[in-house]
């Protein structure tokens, strides 16, 4: 079933012959008024395509991107090399985590707690409070001077394989901007890690402030996930889409990022189920930290796959995958209404955790109850934690022992998720001897 955005854009492209126009000229302009009239959906929602996966199907299929050009006007253009998006390579998720010692006694702060962060602003404010931003930038004194929405001035952008267009009076939003002696730091923040993001979110603010300020303007992508702060400093080049990471850090504040635990003691204390649960599909969501983020941040707005998809900026199919994975681990239930979810008592317990150690211990205990993961983790231990030495076929065989619902092809696909979760175990857990 197509998403609301897919349906709206299909109407627009069919009625306005957009593909014919774009194939002939490389781009096409469209107004917000037209999008609303033809697509029968809010233009703001139709144009919100902040990750590659969140693009409507017709954009993905035809290698298209969209940019706002003026207030209420957009340009849709050919973007065959996806220069409108920056994709993090696989190594970005394996950044060495540094333990950061806060310069502030956190016991004196009652209104902001690391374990209860549920918004981008809270995450940035906490990072500033405990001097994470100071450590990353090298500035001894940072002052918050920019936050929120504003209208841009005028600047030009040359589209990929296309014309140079003028951007003027568009809405730009800066999650936080700090000024120090050495520069101005513009931060785009996310809750949960991202595989990619639309460069407009940093590029427009960077162009705007580069024209206004004498100091160097430094764009930073910031993500907070399961108690860790990820920061990426970028440098933009002369051409649209020309950008590179010049510095990356990941911080754990006043806590060891890796959980030390006795394997045999945990195994002895945790009964393993005789079979996989049949009331929920076997997991297809690869990022365990994102499952934790979903449960910790869970509220009414995240109670549907559509809400989850909007929150994490991926498609609704992935929203369903992550909800089902949280159900599989015992943190969510399906609600009374079709398609909605609710917290279990175990999910509420996870929400009450105030430390990364508490959350990871609870998650690991749940993994140990599921037979596929219990015995896959044992296999990982026997393989000296070399995930790559474990074959998809070996994991698929374990799945088949405890879940007979899937054929060989499907088992192999599900095994790739198991390997992703094993990598999380390897990177986040240190099994120690008795």
Image: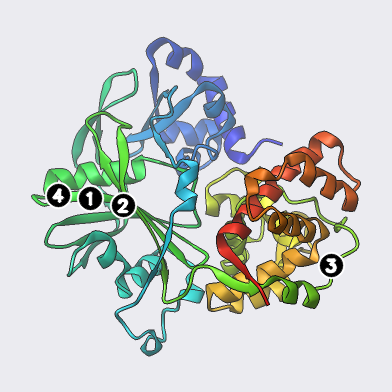
Q: Label 2 neighbourhood size at 10 Å, few (<14), some (14-19), many (20+)?
A: many
Q: Is residue 355 above or below residue 215?
A: below
- Cα–Cα span, label 3 and label 1: 50 Å
- Cα–Cα span, label 2 and label 4: 13 Å
Farthest residue, direction top? 24
- The reply to whether discs 2 and 4 touch (Cβ–Cβ < 8 Å) is no
**Residue under circle 3?**
272
Task: Name the element at disc 2.
Answer: strand
Residue drawn at x 52%, y 48% as measured from the top left: 313
- Cα–Cα span, label 1 and label 2: 7 Å
| Residue 140 found in image quarter | bottom left
- The reply to whether discs 2 and 3 touch (Cβ–Cβ < 8 Å) is no
Decide which of tag 3 and tag 4 comes sooner along the chain: 4
| Residue 322 % position (x, y) | 66, 53
| Residue 318 % position (x, y) | 64, 46
- The reply to whether discs 3 and 1 touch (Cβ–Cβ < 8 Å) is no
**Residue under circle 4?**
216
Decide which of tag 3 and tag 1 comes sooner along the chain: 1
| Residue 136 % position (x, y) | 28, 61
- Cα–Cα span, label 3 and label 4: 56 Å
| Residue 109 found in image quarter | bottom left
| Residue 20 % position (x, y) | 48, 12
- The reply to whether discs 1 and 2 touch (Cβ–Cβ < 8 Å) is yes
Residue drawn at x 36%, y 65% as measured from the top left: 124
Marking on residue 218: 1
């Amino acid at each position: 079933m197509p998403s609301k955005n897919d349906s709206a854009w299909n109407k627009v492209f069919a009625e306005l012959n957009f593909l014919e126009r774009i194939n002939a000229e490389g781009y096409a302009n469209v107004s917000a008024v037209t999008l609303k009239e033809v697509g029968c959906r809010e233009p703001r929602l139709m144009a919100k395509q902040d990750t590659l996966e969140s693009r409507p199907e017709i954009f993905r299929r035809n290698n298209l991107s969209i940019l706002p050009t003026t207030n209420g006007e957009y340009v849709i253009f050919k973007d065959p090399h996806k220069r409108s998006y920056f994709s993090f390579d696989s190594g970005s998720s394996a950044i060495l985590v540094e333990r950061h010692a806060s310069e502030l006694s956190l016991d004196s702060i009652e209104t902001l707690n690391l374990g209860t962060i549920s918004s981008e602003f809270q995450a940035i404010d906490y990072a500033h409070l405990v001097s994470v931003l100071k450590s990353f930038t090298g500035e001894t004194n940072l002052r918050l001077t920019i936050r929120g929405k504003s209208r841009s001035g005028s600047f030009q952008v040359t589209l990929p394989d296309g014309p140079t267009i003028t951007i003027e009076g568009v809405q730009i939003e800066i999650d936080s901007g700090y000024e120090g002696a050495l520069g101005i730091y513009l931060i785009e923040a996310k809750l949960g890690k991202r595989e990619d993001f639309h460069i407009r979110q940093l590029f427009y603010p960077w162009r705007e402030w580069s024209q206004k300020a004498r100091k160097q303007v430094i764009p930073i992508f910031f993500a907070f996930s399961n108690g860790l702060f990820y920061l990426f400093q970028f440098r933009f080049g002369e051409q649209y889409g020309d950008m590179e990471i010049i510095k990356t850090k990941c911080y754990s504040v006043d806590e060891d990022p890796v959980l030390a635990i006795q394997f045999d003691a945990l195994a002895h204390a945790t009964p393993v189920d005789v079979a996989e649960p049949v009331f929920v599909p076997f997991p297809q969501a690869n990022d365990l930290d994102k499952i934790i983020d979903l449960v910790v941040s869970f509220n009414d707005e995240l109670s549907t796959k559509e809400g989850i998809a909007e929150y994490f900026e991926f498609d609704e199919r992935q929203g369903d995958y992550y909800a089902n994975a949280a159900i599989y681990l015992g943190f969510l239930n399906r609600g009374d209404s079709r398609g909605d979810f609710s917290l279990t008592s175990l999910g509420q317990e996870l929400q009450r955790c105030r430390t990364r150690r508490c959350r990871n211990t609870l998650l690991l205990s749940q993994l140990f109850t599921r037979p596929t993961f219990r015995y896959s983790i044992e296999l990982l231990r026997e393989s000296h934690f070399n995930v790559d030495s474990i074959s998809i076929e070996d994991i698929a065989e374990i799945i088949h022992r405890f879940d007979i619902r899937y054929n060989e092809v499907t088992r192999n696909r599900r095994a790739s998720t198991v390997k992703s979760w094993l990598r999380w175990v390897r990177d986040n857990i240190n099994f120690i001897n008795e």
